[in-house]
Amino acid sequence: MAAAPTQLVGYLRGQRDALLVFAAELDAELAAIPQSPPLPTQRTCRTGEQKSDLRSGQSHPHWLESLGFTRFSRN
């Protein structure tokens, strides 16, 4: 037999209250963790350099040139 609507509403309110308590406790725990400064975004770090350039410290040829092809350029 199905539960009466009032019983269901009471059950859902209890579940909501338990969830709100859990969320408040989680928020308090996360607030206690010291936060590190935000990392800079990749776009501000790289400014026109490729990842391989940053790793090795020198520029690398284009991938087509690495395969032996010449790059097309408009004059």
Image: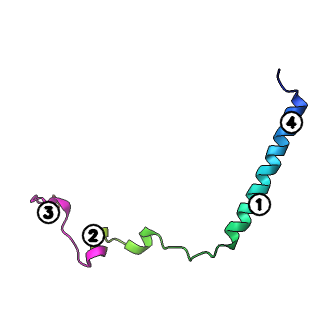
For badge 1, the amino acid type reads: Ala
Of the two numbered discs 2 and 4 in the rendering, the one whose residue sits closer to the viewer: 4
Q: Residue 55 appears at what percent x and percent y? A: 29, 74
Q: Amino acid at mark 4?
A: Val
Q: Which residue is mark 3?
A: 66
Residue 11: percent from left, percent from top: 84, 38
Q: Nearer the viewer, mark 3 or mark 1?
A: 1
Residue 2 lies within the magenta run: no
Within 10 Å of disc 2 (Cα), the crowding (few <14, some 14-19, many 20+) is few
In the image, farthest residue toward the left? 68
**Residue furthest out toward the right:** 6
Q: Is the N terminus in the top left, top right, bottom left or bottom right quadrant?
A: top right
Residue numbers of the magenta segment: 55-71
- Closer to the camera in the image, 66 or 20: 20
Do residues under tags 2 and 3 come within 8 Å of each other at their CB atoms? no
**Cα distance in 3D space between marks 2 and 1:** 45 Å
Going by the image, does 34 lie left or right of 1? left
On screen, residue 57 versus residue 41, left or right, reads left
Secondary structure beneath dot 4 equals: helix
Residue 45, position in %: x, y? 41, 74
* Amino acid type assigned to the residue bearing label 3 in the image: Ser
Q: Which label's residue is closer to the chain start, 3 or 4? A: 4
Quickly name the residue at label 1.
Answer: 24
Label 2 secondary element: helix
